Amino acid sequence: MSRPIRRLALVFGLLLVALLVNITVIQVVLAGDYRDRPGNQRILLEEYDRERGPILVGPDPVARSKETGDTLRYLRVYSNGPLYAPVTGFYSLIYGATGLERTENRILTGKSPLFVVDRAEQLFAGLEPRGGAVSTTINARAQRAAFTDLRGKKGAVVAIEPSTGRILASVQSPSFDPNKLSSHDPAAIRAYYTSLESDPAMPLLNRPIVSLNPPGSTFKVVTAAAALASGKYTPDSMLPGPRAYQLPNSTHKIRNWTGQACSSTGLVSLRDALAVSCNTAFAWLGDQLGADALRAQAELMGFDNSFQIPLRAATSRFPEDPDPAQTAMSAIGQFDVRATALQMAMVAATVANNGKTMSPYLVQEIRGPDLGILKTTEPTQFAQALDPLYAAQLADMMVNVVDNGTGSNARISGVRVAGKTGTAQTGNDNPAVAWFIAFAPAQSPEVAVAVVVEDAGAPEVSGNQLAAPIAKDVIEAVLR
């Protein structure tokens, strides 16, 4: 055999090996990824021939399958679709699945290994295969309260049970109706999806866990935690709180939202600085603590970490390498600090839970077709973010914010409420973002809440005005 022919044979041999390796990778290694990819219509058509299991809030199905008698045998229907859309997502013939409809697809279709026994029993009994049920952690009253209060605004609410990480509410506004994306009318589905995609308010965005905004003064809770944890400061430590603070190595100054000094003497305690949301005191404190201490405290509370609840949440972040001026700005939740509503609910929950940060989760139980429990999610601790003593001190400081400071609209008669207001600019020409985080210490049941209202208007519009009343209503809904 001549040398050119041998080379050609070698090339074809290598190509054949590469082809076999590629086929093996696709059919074996990546088979699950291709099968579960949103928009895989062959799999979707197969799944429309079996009864898909429900998604439950308490005992009630908020997503279920209804028999149609048509070629597509089952139709997915949603009770109060826009209310639960951030949780359920949608299940669409055209656009695949999102939300729990996507992440729990193998449960809902009955194809999970958890259902081996059920499938065998169905086969031997001559029964048609049915999917399992997903029981969520959502509290229906809290979800409804947040949804009602957010109507007409753009924003998100997340409520968490501090001791477990159970997500009690996950609400967005604007929302969308998953029923219109899960119909059997392709033209109507496409028209509705196009209208949602072209809406500048982005109703398809899962705001509670994906939308990143500067947390503003709610981040002062993280800065206060870092100060207490350093051992150098107590709630009674006196800080400079002038009308304006010259940023280190910069020509720029930070001013207080009131335009005044935070006390008549120019000095303010850490407790009172949090209560009146003193920008200059916390900017100075951030410079004293340094970026590394602030970042370490933020990360213990969840920043710079990715959480799957099982929906994947966006990673909230603290700046990587800020200079001293940027560190001072970061200490008051400005510069490049960004957080989701989920993250700031975790911050509040950490303080409420004696300094323990719990991993958040949305699925409480996996159930069989007969609704028998097959698997229960066990709470897991993410980090001991703060010593219990310091957490108790910080909780008292946050109660003072509501009782005597900027969080007055969160007061509940007969209930101690801990909270923190926040307002931030997302850009020079953009409206402000208003925040409020809160919890009710020593109450049962427990709840910690974060509310963010985007496009809140002028910078002087406060979290106390727009967000605190929503947090109050959510807390009351849980406590009822």
Image: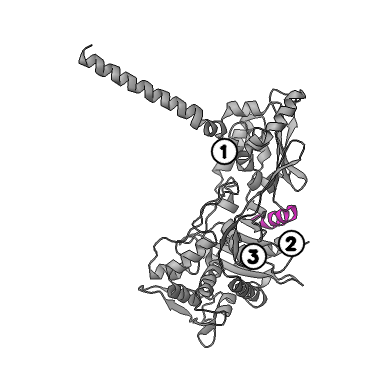
The spot of residue 286 in percent (x, y) is 46, 72
Q: Which circle's residue, 3 or 2, is located before the other in the chain?
A: 3
Q: Residue at x 33, y 19 (%)?
A: 13
Amino acid type for the residue under numbered disc 2? Pro
Mark 1 highlights which residue? Answer: 194
Residues at marks 1 and 3 touching, judged by CB atoms closer than 8 Å: no
Any part of residue 406 in sight: no
Give the farthest residue toward the left: 3
The residue segment tinted magenta is 139-152
Q: Tag 3: Cα neighbours inside 10 Å, few (<14), some, or many (≥20)?
A: many
Classify residue 125 by image quadrant.
top right
Q: Position of residue 255 (x, y in %)?
A: 47, 75
User: The N terminus is located in which quarter?
Assistant: top left
Q: Position of residue 85 (x, y in %)?
A: 65, 45
> Residue at the top extreme?
1
What's the mark number on residue 445? 2
142 in the magenta segment: yes
Q: Earlier in the sequence, mark 1 or mark 3?
A: 1
Question: Quick check: 34 left or right of 137?
Answer: left
Residue 147 tag number: none
Badge 1 or badge 2: first in the primary sequence: 1
- Say which of marks 1 and 3 sits in front: 3
User: Mark 3 belongs to which amino acid?
Assistant: Asn
Applied colour scheme = one colour
